[in-house]
Image (spheres, helix red, strand yellow):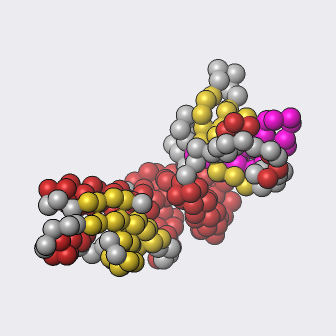
Amino acid sequence: MELEVGDLVLCIVDRIVGTVVFVKIPLENQEIEGSIVMSEIAPGRIRNLRDYVVPKKKVVCKVLRISSQGNIELSLRRVTQKEKKEVIEQDKQEKSYLSILKSILGDKAEQTVREISKSGRLYSFLEEAKINPENLERIAGKEESGKILEILNAQKKKKTVLKKEIRMTSIKPNGISLIKKILEMFGEIKVKYISAGRYTLELESEDIKNADKKLRELIERAEKEAKKLGIEFSVK
């Protein structure tokens, strides 16, 4: 697996030299080095780098540039909280997947992981294998593949609750009815009343990325409809 610009990676802080932070990136049974300049640690003025990073701390970074010599420049500040949470969760799941492979394949597990790594991350490969098992069968064998997938599919994935706050107000006589009409557009999304004109939307899902996309699309549709009805609509 090769890194590309824009990739999110879990790194371990190795050392701090002046205003540059050097990290180790675990990748395919090896560790490669990356660097983060001070301006990419956090927005605004930084008085002390060690308020943000210290040796041995795990951080999620975004790949900014990869030079022709292979130097990898990273950013810590450009990673959102949602992205950070997703990468950490995938890393935990990947370790669990690795244990499953070792328990089923024994001595063959290491070679299998190397083969899988040629086409991408172990996590992504096995998630895809749940739907299309052909590549896993080719690498691990049909019988062993069946045992691996049986365990993977039996695992209960952790659900995450996504929340968004919206605000709607109207000076029209039937404003309350119009607002209720907009709220009905969210269907199975859980809607909670906070205070005058403020509501939270909650969506529980195992797939954070698709759930976030779905919630954003629903909000966009609701905002367009609200404007047609003369309702002031905003998202916090």
> Number of labelled discs?
0
Q: Is residue 17 magenta?
A: yes
- As rendered, which of 50 and 33 lies closer to the eye? 50
- Quadrant containing the C terminus in the rendered view: bottom left
Q: Is residue 46 above or below residue 143?
A: above
Which of 9/54 is in front?
54
Q: Give whichever of 196, 179 is nearer the camera.
A: 196
**Which percent across, then down, holds residue 7?**
55, 41
What residue do we see at 50% from left, 73% from top? 158
Check residue 141 for magenta coloring: no
Q: Position of residue 18 (x, y in %)?
A: 86, 35
**Residue 48 seen in the current view:** yes
Q: Is residue 179 left or right of residue 38?
A: left
The image quarter containing residue 30 is: top right
* Residue drawn at the location 27% of the way across and 67% of the way down: 169
Residue 118, can we see it? no
The kind of secondary structure the magenta stretch mainly shows is: strand
Q: Quadrant of the N terminus?
A: top right
Segment tinted magenta in the rendering: 8-30
Instruction: Estimate the x, y position of residue 121 in percent, counting from the top left.
Output: 55, 49
Q: Position of residue 39 (x, y in %)?
A: 69, 36
Q: Can you say whether 14 is above or below 232 in the image? A: above
Q: Nearer the viewer, residue 230 or 221?
A: 230
Q: In which image quadrant can residue 146 be found? A: bottom left
- Image: 5 above or below 49: above
Q: Residue at x 48, y 77 (%)?
A: 156
For the point 32% across and 71% down, the residue is: 197
Side (left or right) of 13 relative to 63 = right
- Image quadrant assignment for residue 35: top right
